[in-house]
Image (cartoon, helix red, strand yellow):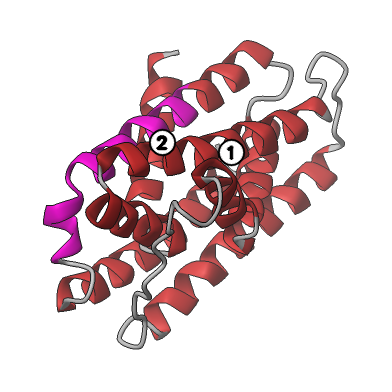
């Protein structure tokens, strides 16, 4: 179980390093309107993640799950390909990736609602959670406790890292338009490929 928790923390730290609309929204909002506003925005993002994960897991019953090996291998392969494709796109376009001002004005609408929208309407969010849940479900067949532990620790890690982004927003803000962010995008591209390869290896060859 310790290995499962460590693996979940690793995925959470990986998500924390991704630079996109969620990252920029948290940092910019915290800088412009204060840490309290950043935390309120983050709460909407957390609710979105919890709802998406809960709905996807609701369709998974590990106690009765019996996936034919060939289908399980195909699903694991598809999950790996999706991750590797995202990674390749980041590597190819790493120099062209720029951060945009995605700050939210709290005077316009509810920050919680904005957090929900920023996260839920981000195509990567659904792709990531669907792919990860499919891969972990296949790896941990009929081990419901292990699966719930993995996603529980992962979601807690996301909350912790989002809070860190809010409290370190002024330091992170100076990096948003620097060369460092481009290099970070390059590194996360390789991490995507490694993660995709790991999903395939873990299920097909382990």
Q: Main secondary structure of the magenta part?
A: helix
Write down the quadrant of residue 11 in the picture: top left
Q: Which residues are magenta?
A: 153-174
* Nearer-the-camera pick, 114 or 81: 114
- Quarter holding the C terminus is top right
Circles 1 and 2, Cβ within 8 Å, touching? The answer is yes
Distance from the alpha carbon under mark 1 to that under mark 2:
9 Å
Residue 47: x and y, percent?
A: 58, 34
- Quarter holding the N terminus is top left
Q: What is the crowding at mark 1: few (fewer than 14 residues within 10 Å), some, or many (at least 20)?
A: many
Residue 111 appears left or right of 38? right
Q: What is the crowding at mark 2: few (fewer than 14 residues within 10 Å), some, or many (at least 20)?
A: many
Q: Secondary structure at mark 1?
A: helix
Write down the quadrant of residue 183 in the picture: bottom left
Read off the residue under disc 2.
158
Residue 44 appears left or right of 67? left
Q: Is residue 7 visible?
A: no
Q: Is residue 170 magenta?
A: yes
Nearer the N terminus, badge 1 or badge 2?
1
> Which residue is pictured at 53% across the width and 65% down the height?
84
Read off the residue under disc 1.
49
* Nearer-the-camera pick, 44 or 75: 44
């Amino acid at each position: 179980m310790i290995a499962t928790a460590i693996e979940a923390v690793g995925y959470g730290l990986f998500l924390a390093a991704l630079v996109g609309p969620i990252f920029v929204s948290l940092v910019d909002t915290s800088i412009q309107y204060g840490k309290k506003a950043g935390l309120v925005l983050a709460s909407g993002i957390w609710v979105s993640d919890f709802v998406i994960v809960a709905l996807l897991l609701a369709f998974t019953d590990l106690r009765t799950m019996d996936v034919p090996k060939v289908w399980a291998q195909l699903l694991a392969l598809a999950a790996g390909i999706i991750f590797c494709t995202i990674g390749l796109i980041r590597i190819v376009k790493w120099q062209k990736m720029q951060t945009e001002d995605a700050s939210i004005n709290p005077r316009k609408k509810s920050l919680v609602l904005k957090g929900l929208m920023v996260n839920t309407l981000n195509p990567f969010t659904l792709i990531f959670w669907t792919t990860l849940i499919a891969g972990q479900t296949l790896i941990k067949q009929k081990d419901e406790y292990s699966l719930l532990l993995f996603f529980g620790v992962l979601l807690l890690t996301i909350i912790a890292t989002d809070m860190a982004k809010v409290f370190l927003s002024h330091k992170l803000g100076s990096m948003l338009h620097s060369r460092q962010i481009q290099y970070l995008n390059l590194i996360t591209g390789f991490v995507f490929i490694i993660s995709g390869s790991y999903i395939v290896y873990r299920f097909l060859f382990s």
